[in-house]
Amino acid sequence: MALTDPLYRAGQAVLAREPQDNTALLLHNLYEDKVLCILKAGPDVLECGGQRITIRRARGIPFPLFHGAASLALLPWLPAQRILQTYLQSPKAIAGAGLGNDWEGFRHAMAAVRRTGYATSSGTITPLLSGVAVPILSPSGRLLGSLARTMPTETLTPGAEAEHARTLRVLAQLVAHACCDASAARRGDAEMASPQRSASRKRPLHPQDECPNEKQQDERTPGDTGIGRGRRGWRGNIPDPGHR
């Protein structure tokens, strides 16, 4: 996967040259209902209050969609039905994570993250470490992944949080454009290698392969999940969790 995944290749090209000062950048993708770190740029161990803390969110380890900043930078940008399904599958775990004791509370929590444009967490995965994360969106608004920076909690002042968010947004845009370029190149190579197969293939090689055509995940406007509206504002036949 690593050698051919457009998101991985894009992250490798963009993040490898980003300097790290006792922080690390973590690139994530969504696989089914889990979030995986597919690339880390920076040290494996951070210095915090005289201690050496190993970053636990290592490459290849799956985490729930509601656990940690990197996950919370993905979930609010998923289609509304997917967000609802996530809640229905794990309401107790979501409440335990402090994201709402019922569907309305969870919906408002996701809307708040979307309004902010980034997610944060402290000590959720690794004690004494915090994270700031942003979604990676294609030019059309399609969700490609998330990008997080982890750092010692003691260094994450409000000012530092805002600065990390700004930097991550810029890097996420660079990764998104590089991902689209890598997808286009990969699709072009595949078409040259097998024109007949390419002409008959109905599904993309990889989810990111849709990026050059800027296709949407569904018929909503770019990045719109409907979670900031009342239930009547949802598109499609989405059930009320209280009336299943």
Image (tube, rainbow, N blue to C red):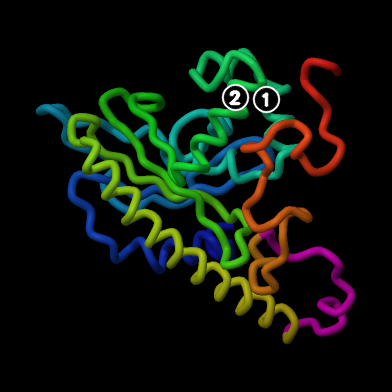
For residue 86, what is the image quadrant?
top right
Q: Please name the residue that numbered disc 2 is placed on.
A: 106
Residue 179 in the image, given as x and y percentages of width and height: 54, 67
Residue 80 in the image, given as x and y percentages of width and height: 71, 39
Q: Could you give the CA–CA distance between mark 1 and mark 2, rounded to whole angstroms?
A: 8 Å
114 vs 207, nearest the viewer: 114
For mark 1, does the 10 Å Cα neighbourhood hold few (<14), some (14 to 19), or many (20 or more) residues? many
Above or below, 106 against 229 in this view is above
150 vs 198, nearest the viewer: 150
| Position of residue 225 in the picture relative to residue 121 (left or right) | right
| Position of residue 217 in the picture relative to residue 116 (left or right) | right
Q: Which mark is residue 87?
A: 1
Above or below, 212 against 234 in this view is below
The residue at 45%/48% (across/down) is 134
Q: Amino acid at mark 1?
A: Tyr
Q: What segment is highlighted magenta in the picture?
A: 193-207
Residue 194 in the image, given as x and y percentages of width and height: 79, 82
The residue at 60%/45% (across/down) is 77
